Image (tube, grey):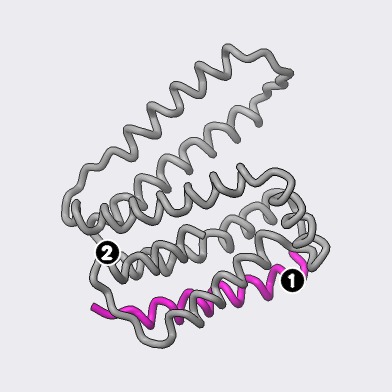
Amino acid sequence: LWPVLTLLLSLPLLGRRASGLLLPGTALALAGLVLVVVPGGPRAWFAVAHGAADSPLPYVLAGGAAASWALYSNLTSRWAAGRDAGAVVVFLVAAAVVLVAVSAAVVEPRRWSARTGAEVAYLGLATWSAYGLWDRALRRGDTAVVVAASFLTPLLATAIASLYLSVIPGPGLWLGCICLVAGSLLSRRSLRG
């Protein structure tokens, strides 16, 4: 939800204007995102709805996180435009240190290998780089372009996971990807100012 909310909040917070393409583009990108993230048709949606009804707190927290990130993204672009340094990279390092300390204090079964260590190192570096580059892009670039491009995140993540896990994506995934890319392009095209 955060790309959708970031685009929509850019209207009041950054003074952007949008044409009539914004809502259909955003809806198309969101529909594609849903197809990519929750494959499996109506049964999967029923399971998600059932899970939300049984335990709403994770869904509320996820919605709050999406809204917080959308606000952060727009307000960073508004208040820190042109500046290089941000707190995101420092926060990520501090969070990693705290999580490693917590992990060391928790007893749970673990099987470490060279591959596991490489995967953890890659994920840590990728996360640190992605958030750092996102923060820099919002400070130095065109927020509308950056946010519209962020709709491609699930597509890229799915492609990388499919390659790494040797999984062949199904037709629903490809349809979702097409919707995501088309909706992203429409959403970006709709923004002005």
> Where is the C terminus found, in terms of image quarters?
bottom left
17 or 132: nearer the eye? 17
Q: CA distance from mark 1 to mark 2?
A: 35 Å
Earlier sequence position, callout 1 versus callout 2: 2
Q: Which mark is residue 13?
A: 2
53 lies left or right of 82? right
Circle 1: is it few (<14), some (14-19), or many (20+) Cα within 10 Å?
some
Point 79% across, 60% down: residue? 46
146 w.r.t. 99: above or below:
below
Q: Residue furthest left?
A: 82
Amino acid residing under circle 1: Gly
Instruction: Find residue 83 and report its horizontal and vertical position in percent.
Output: 17, 50
Q: Are marks 1 and 2 in contact (CB under 8 Å)?
A: no
**Badge count:** 2
Up the image or down, 111 lies above or below 148; here it is above
Q: Position of residue 80 (x, y in %)?
A: 19, 51
| Left or right of residue 67, residue 56 in this image | right
Three-letter code for the amino acid on which mark 2 is drawn: Leu
- Callout 2 environment at 10 Å: few (<14), some (14 to 19), or many (20+)? some
Magenta segment = 169-193
| 31, 86: nearer the viewer | 31
Residue corresponding to mark 1: 172
Identify the residue at horizontal 69%, vertical 51% (top origin): 52
Residue 188 within the magenta-colored segment of the rendering: yes
Tag 2 secondary structure? helix
